Amino acid sequence: MIKKNCRRGFTLIEILFVLLIIGILAAIAIPVYKAQTISAKMTEVTNAVSYIATSLNIYHHNSVQVETTNVWPNCGSIAEIQTSLGVGLGALGRISSASVNQATGIISVTVANIDSTVDGSTITLAPSTAADSSISWKWGGTILPRYLPKQ
């Protein structure tokens, strides 16, 4: 015997439960995805700043060996960093400006083209010189601390 009134499909309650579960997952997943995307892009910026710091280490050690009074270069722009230290930042596109303070050696970079929550923020990397002329670096700036590398 074949039933003619077979129910096919889902009830309204079943559909609402599925939509509720999808909504909850989306509410959790989207902000986490956005934060991870920002962190990944910020890694590009912090790597570029680290390259500048490595070049400054070499510049500083060479200056100390020849006993010059100016132990930090005068780099007020990305182009000057490129010519003085040989570090290219122009192709990155995530940095709108960068400079090295000649008096203190502090590297300052302004973030761009990542996300509205971090665009326009600055990242700084400050040197601390020991008696044996070794250098340690400390991250800082106006950017949220969760986007900076661990100290």
Image (tube, rainbow, N blue to C red):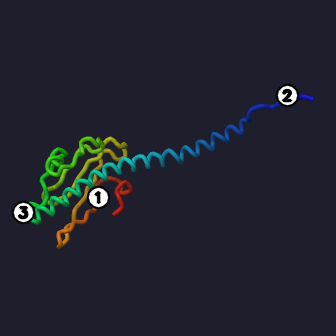
- The three-letter amino acid code for the residue at tag 1 is Gly
Residue corresponding to mark 3: 68
Residue corresponding to mark 1: 140
| Residue 39 image offset from top left, x and y in percent | 39, 50
Is disc 2 placed on a helix, strand or loop?
Answer: loop
| Residue 52 image offset from top left, x and y in percent | 23, 54
Place residue 20 in its image quadrant.
top right
| Residue 104 image offset from top left, x and y in percent | 16, 60
Is disc 1 placed on a helix, strand or loop?
Answer: strand
Q: Tell whether label 1 touches label 2 (CB within 8 Å).
A: no
For marks 3 and 1, the one nearer the N-term is 3
Is disc 3 placed on a helix, strand or loop?
Answer: loop
Quadrant housing the N terminus: top right
For marks 2 and 1, the one nearer the N-term is 2
Residue corresponding to mark 2: 5
How far separated are the C-alphas under marks 2 and 1?
70 Å
Tell me what residue is drawn at x 20 percent, y 58 percent. Answer: 106
Residue sitting nearer the eye, 90 or 76: 90
- The three-letter amino acid code for the residue at tag 3 is Thr
Tell me what residue is drawn at x 25 percent, y 65 percent. Answer: 136
Counting the numbered discs, the total is 3
For marks 2 and 3, the one nearer the N-term is 2
Mark 2 is surrounded, within 10 Å at the Cα level, by few (under 14), some (14 to 19) or many (20 or more) other residues, namely few
Residue sitting nearer the eye, 139 or 68: 68
